[in-house]
Image (cartoon, rainbow, N blue to C red):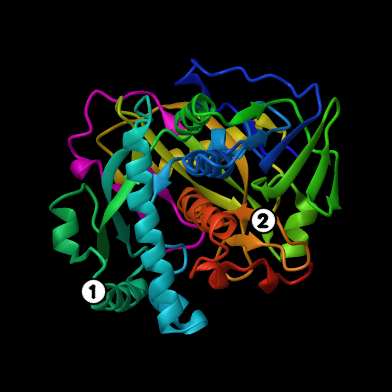
Amino acid sequence: MNLHNGQLYWPETYTEITQFPELEENISCDVLIVGGGMAGALCAHVLSQEKELDVVLIDRRHPGSGSSSANTGLLQFSSDKMLHELIEQQGEQDAVYFYQLCQTAMKDLYKVASQLSENPEFRPQKSLYFASAGEDASKLIREYEVLKKYDFPVDYLEPSEISSRFPFSKPAALVTSGDADVNPYKFVQILLKDAAATGVRIFEQTPLIRKTKTVHGFTCESERGVISARYIIFATGYENDFLAQQLGADLNRSYAIVTEPLPSLKTWYKEWMIWETKRPYLYMRTTKDGRIVAGGLDEDKAEAPLNEGMIEEHGERILEKVREHFPDLAPRISHTWCATFGESHDGLPYIGEHPNRLGEYYCLGFGGNGTVYSMLGATIIKDLITKGFHPASRLFTIARAVSL
């Protein structure tokens, strides 16, 4: 599968990547992580803190070169599904607990980023979530009331309050605190480099060809070596279309652009991240060097198109949306790409142990909050391996999947 096509921006911003060896011998370990993107890198980081565990990570490419290199780096505790909508689906207790878990994961991401050997351009931010049309204002009012009820950091803005801050007005908006943006590619590369420095063995160009359950764990065959592991974690993201079908997930594609650096962003109030109630939604953020990252125009197709003209046309459409909101900035596109992303059947990530294969875990952050879900998943799976229990695991169990 082509996970992305077009001209990616993030890999150009960080070239001091670590080249890892290819596996060329038979080895053993306690935990094998399959996949070196955001989910795998966070799992490696969290598990590297458990000194009694011997951890190995493999990636079929160079780690971080799959979906993570096409990630736009908006990190929020809010889900694509509003809390009041999730309450109707999951019940109040579980829905609120899920949002609280995401809030905690945001704090964990900040802590992880602050402890790395290099700054991954992690910036605490606020998010503006605006009503795309007048009829959406009532949904935002309802969401505000529920978020406030459970002490989530949120404010409600009237149209005049929006237009006093931005060069556009909307029927209503929520402002959430405790969010962040990040350079996702740099984040993954530094996570892996630091994990390797603490003893995690990482192999690139090492695909998992065959997995066999044994009495003591798993035998995992690659092209030039075999790994014996007590536990295995699949952090393969959107790579496996068959797995997505088994889980009842949808694979779609989205488009994104990055602009040339702008001389000033003074009309962009405090560089808040921006998204909207319309589905599929437009989202926008800035970078440390004054660029705009924007995306949207999601399509119900899994694989990124090979047609560069199609990708550029979608990029121009996104740019027009940016210009509608910031007519004074006159941004110009420097990079445009299209990437695959996944959505679970119920809006929650897939995290936990396979119900029929003990010792086999999944950390799949399907949804718009993939990085936040990956942080949450890494923490849950660490506790499941080291303690045998995590109170949140019941929410994300693989057993809820449509077909296994």
Q: Is residue 273 left or right of residue 238?
A: left
In the image, residue 311 sits, relative to residue 261, either above or below, namely: below
Mark 2 vs mark 1: give the one in front.
2
Looking at the rendering, which quadrant does residue 209 occupy? top right
Query: Residue at position x 52%, y 51% from top?
Result: 378
Provide the residue designation for mark 1: 148
Rendered location of residue 86, percent (x, y): 46, 76
Figure quadrant of residue 258: top left
Q: Secondary structure at mark 1?
A: helix
Q: In percent of the image, x 62 and y 68: which residue is there? A: 397
Residue 313 in view: no
Q: Is residue 304 above or below residue 386?
A: above
Locate residue 267 relative to residue 21 in the image: left or right.
Answer: left
Residue at 66% from the left image edge and 62% from the top image edge: 353
Q: Amino acid at mark 2?
A: Tyr
Q: Which mark is residue 361?
A: 2
- Range drawn in magenta: 258-284
